[in-house]
Image: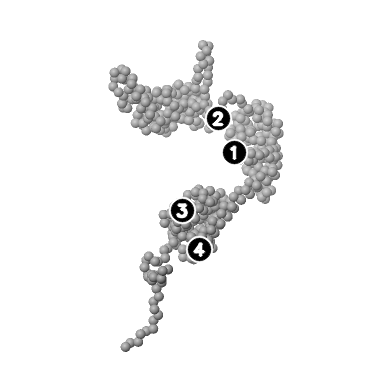
Amino acid sequence: MSNLTNTSPLVLPQNINGSLVNPYKPEVRAKVVNYCLYARKSSEDDERQALSIDSQIKEMTIVAQSEDLNVTDIRRESHSAKNSSARPVFNQMIQDIRKGVFQGILTWAPDRLSRNAGDLGSIVDLMDSGYLKEIRAHGQALTNSPNDKFLLMILCSQAKLENDNRGINVKRGMKTKCELGYRPNQAPLGYLNDYYSGKGQKQVFTDKERAPFIKQAFEKVAYEGFSGRNLYDWFKNETTFRSKSGKVYTLSMIYRMLNNLYYCGIFEYSGKWYPGSHEAIISRELFELVQKKMMIPRKSKPGTKEFAFTKLLKCGACGSGITAQEKFKRYKSGELKRYVYYHCSQFKDFDCREPYIREEKLTEQLINLLQKVSIEEIETKATLKPELDKFMVIKTAMNNLNNATSVIKTDVDITDFINYIFQKGSRTQKHELINCLNTTLYLENRTISIKE
């Protein structure tokens, strides 16, 4: 009889209820958690956080390797987390977690995930639902346990509090700067910002090169009756008043200059007026006199009238838009007639001398150009198809009176329909009809042309 060897009995793991479990069965093996490495920096602070994303990824990759974490994807985003549901990459990651693509998030700190209540609620909801197993941050792991979720909410709420306080602190700092006499933004034309002094010590200096021209400009409007256009021509042809890149200042820039009280030594910020610490270029009396000279009484607000064919054509000479104006003439018989003239708006070239054209002549040319438009193309336009059907009903009724056959679409005279829209149609329908040409129209020497 052989001797039995002294062996220890095999001990199998047990479930909570005491039954034995085979550890080699696939269903009891520990499921691998797939992590998404999420790195974010605020787009509002690009200079200070220029290397933030790369450094976050580098540090968290080291953590993943040391702790043997299965990182299956890296998501990076340059976007502020101040507002909820505003980050496309983060929103996509949340959707992927719900689909089961990831079960864990690896990030530098919880505030990289959320600085608002909405996104924080989405994360906690994923943990409550079991989709999100774990959040790994630098030096801490947050699992789906009451204490860890409570800690996560505290950390993200603290980040939101920092954001809110930062906004209050910035506003307080801006207010203090205004009370000291410094407008907290770029100084206007005629002044230079101080870029070299320390923080809180920067001043605004008078631009010795441009300030004399600005003062002369105000004086010319007040005492010589100059308009904004006159000033533009004067700056362009008789002075060296130019931008830093050597360009002539635009007419809109000149009008902004003439309406800016900063040149009197005061400025507005957030609806309040403050005395400035900068040197005034003109007096308040001169400024008020300029405003009176520039004040032009109008019977109606500019831009309130609508004309049939504006915003459809460009000037063939300078490329500006074509605008329109109306004139009224009363004849000896007492009849009052209205005339509409189209001409270059001179937006791109103040010296453009393209002649005007009467609306009747413009309409004739447009009708000739529209002859090649097909009925099928008109039917594709949402606002024109009902009018085409209505036009066919009218033509059919007229044919019935004349004992003729009913009208079908192929029998519609395109010229008759164009005249019908130009006479009875709305401005939108006229635009839609002209857009059937699918090209840009140019007006030059009172003639409409198509330029490739």
- Disc 4 and disc 3: Cα gap in Å? 22 Å
Residue 341 shows in this picture: yes
State the SS at label 4.
helix
Identify the residue at horizontal 29%, vertical 18% (top origin). Answer: 403
- Disc 2 and disc 1: Cα gap in Å? 19 Å
Residue located beneath label 3 in the image = 94
Residue located beneath label 2 in the image = 350
Residue located beneath label 4 in the image = 63
- Picture quarter with the C terminus: top left
Q: Which mark is residue 54?
A: none
- Disc 4 and disc 1: Cα gap in Å? 55 Å
Identify the residue at horizontal 31%, vertical 20% (top origin). Answer: 399
- Picture quarter with the N terminus: bottom left
Mark 1 is surrounded, within 10 Å at the Cα level, by few (under 14), some (14 to 19) or many (20 or more) other residues, namely: few
- Disc 4 and disc 2: Cα gap in Å? 64 Å
Three-letter code, disc 3: Ile
Mark 2 is surrounded, within 10 Å at the Cα level, by few (under 14), some (14 to 19) or many (20 or more) other residues, namely: some
Q: Is 75 above or below relative to 268?
A: below
* 369 sits to left or right of 135: left
Residue located beneath label 1 in the image = 246
Identify the residue at horizontal 45%, vertical 22% (top origin). Answer: 361
- Which of disc 3 and disc 4 is earlier in sequence? 4
Q: Nearer the viewer, residue 227 or 316?
A: 227
- Which of disc 1 and disc 2 is earlier in sequence? 1
